[in-house]
Amino acid sequence: MDAGQAVLIYDGSCPVCRKTAGALGKRGFPGAFEFLPCDSAEVSRRYPQISRADCLRAVQLVLPDGTVLAGSAAAPEIAARIPRYRWIAPLLRLPAVAFVAEFAYRTFARNRNLIARTRGC
C-alpha cells in the first residue's frame, strides 16, 4: 500500500459494488485507492478490526492513518480523492447532506442485489 493510498473494501459478491470498484480502478487515480473485496484473506489479515458483517453491511474505507470510515461516512473522502468529484467532498461533509446521504446509502445497501438485478449488472 502506498503511503497516501486509501484502501477501499467492498462487497465482492455485489455486482454494483464490483462494477463501481472496477470503474474507479480503470480510471486509474494514481495512488488514491487500493481495492480489496470483503472476502479477501488480505482484509482479515491486514484489518482484523473490520468484521465480515461490517464489511457486508457497508463499504469500508481505510485511510493512510488507519482511520476506518464506513458507508456514507466514506463518501466525502472517496470524492476528495477523485479529481472530477473533489468539489463535492465539502458538500458531503455538511450535516444536512450527510444525514440525507446516510439514509440514501442505507437504502441502497439494503437493496443492492435487487438494484443490480434491475440494472442488469
Image (spheres, rainbow, N blue to C red):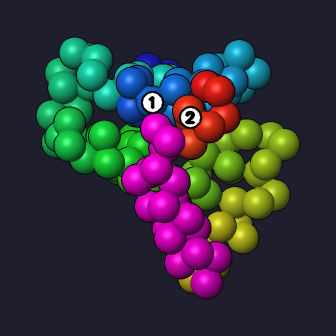
Quarter of the image containing the N terminus? top left
In the image, what residue type sits under mark 2?
Ala
Residue 38 sits in quarter: top left
Q: Which residue is mark 1?
A: 14
N-terminal-most mark, 2 or 1: 1
Residue 93 sits in quarter: bottom right
**Structural distance between the alpha carbons of marks 2 and 1:** 8 Å
Q: Does 66 sit above or below residue 26?
A: below
Q: Main secondary structure of the magenta part?
A: helix
- Position of residue 67 in the picture relative to residue 111 (left or right): left
Residue 68 position within the rendered picture, expressed as x and y whole percent measured from the top left = 35, 49
Q: Are marks 2 and 1 in contact (CB under 8 Å)?
A: yes
Q: Does 11 sit above or below residue 88?
A: above
What residue is shown at x 51% (from left), y 54% (from top)? 108
* Magenta part of the chain: 96-114
Q: Is residue 31 visible?
A: no
Quarter of the image containing the C terminus? top right
In the image, what residue type sits under mark 1?
Cys
Q: Which residue is mark 2?
A: 116
Q: Nearer the viewer, mark 2 or mark 1?
A: 2
Total number of numbered labels?
Answer: 2
Residue 60 sits in quarter: top left
Q: Does 105 sit above or below residue 10?
A: below
What residue is shown at x 44% (from left), y 61% (from top)? 106
Q: Is residue 120 visible?
A: yes
Front residue (pair 2, 106): 106
Asked whether residue 98 is drawn in magenta, I would say yes
Asked whether residue 107 is drawn in magenta, I would say yes
